[in-house]
Image (cartoon, helix red, strand yellow):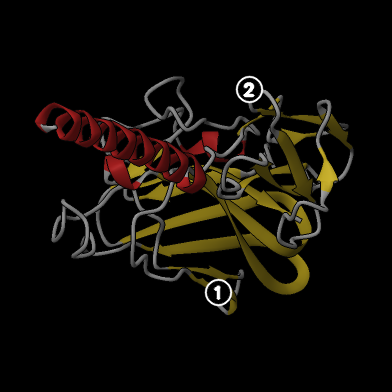
Amino acid sequence: MRNKIYVVLCFCFIFSACTEREKIAYTAAEVFELASPKLQADSLLFNNTAKVTAVFNLEGAEVRYTTDGTEVTSDALLYQNPITVNEPTEFVFRAFHSAYHMSEEARIRVLKVKKDISTAKVTVMPAPDSNYMGPGAMGLVNLQKGTLQFKTGNHWLGFQGEKIRIVLDFEKETSISKLIVSSLNDQGSWIFLPKTIRIFADSKEEIGMLSVPLPTDAAPKNIALLDVSVVAGSYKRIEIQIDLLEAIPQWHQGKGTAPFFFIDEILVE
């Protein structure tokens, strides 16, 4: 009798353990969130066309996207092949799979060069940090973009301080309604976006301003194209004043330290 009871107890224990393992495996799959698709563009700046590619290798998964700024749902456009565009476009992608939670959104923005200001005289004050000189001041208008790997190539100018002044002297009066500052946001490397960007005209009149929200939590590293609308007009000279964060926010491991600011290109439209 005692042996029978022992056998029954062992069976119950084994059955319970198997059931528990099944529950754990099911729960793990149920709450698993897909990684975001990896996005690539043959050129973030283009004259004629740009090609955007989304990579996500998981059997049974699908990638969907929007180009109008709306949320990517399971009814959004289905990505199947690299997408070629001939106009400035911001893509938002997301991965879906029936067995997992959808991924976070991934974004990429490609810009069509509307005005070539590569002949402008560029003055930058103060000089960039000696470790991050890039190609010098003229690199800000040479239509050459840096990548997220800021130590690779020679495109990014890095600054650490409180304020940067950049003066653009054009060869001739140039009509402008918007200015775009290409910056790097890589908080893991202590590189943050600025506080504000102010634009001044020849007469020192302020013609545009952008305030960048202070980050309250960590964000994935990305290339941020900061749009600053300006009073539409023709200008021979503009001055860009960029106010930097004085200190890294308290939630970051580098709190209290002066962050870096990286810039690689200025565009006008």
Q: How crowded is mark 2: few (under 14 residues within 10 Å), some or many (20 or more)?
A: few
Picture layout, residue 145 above or below residue 194:
above
- Counting from the top left corner in percent of width and height, residue 222 is at 49, 43
Mark-to-mark CA distance, 2 and 1: 42 Å
| Residue with the mark numbered 2 | 57
The number of discs equals 2
**Residue 94 or residue 152, whichever sits in front:** 94
Mark 2 or 1: the one toward you: 2
- Secondary structure category for the residue under label 1: strand
- Snapshot quadrant of residue 86: top right
Residue depicted at x 64% and y 27%: 56
**Residue 164 or residue 234, whichever sits in front:** 164
Q: Quadrant of the C terminus?
A: bottom right
Residue depicted at x 19% and y 30%: 4
Residue depicted at x 25% and y 52%: 259
**Residue 251 or residue 161, whichever sits in front:** 251
Q: Given the image, on which type of amino acid does mark 1 rest?
A: Met
- Snapshot quadrant of residue 42: top right
Extreme residue in the left direction: 2
| Residue with the mark numbered 1 | 209
Extreme residue in the bottom direction: 205
- Counting from the top left corner in percent of width and height, residue 142 is at 62, 33
Given contact means CB atoms under 8 Å apart, are the residues at marks 2 and 1 in contact? no
Q: Given the image, on which type of amino acid does mark 2 rest?
A: Asn
Q: Quadrant of the N terminus?
A: top left
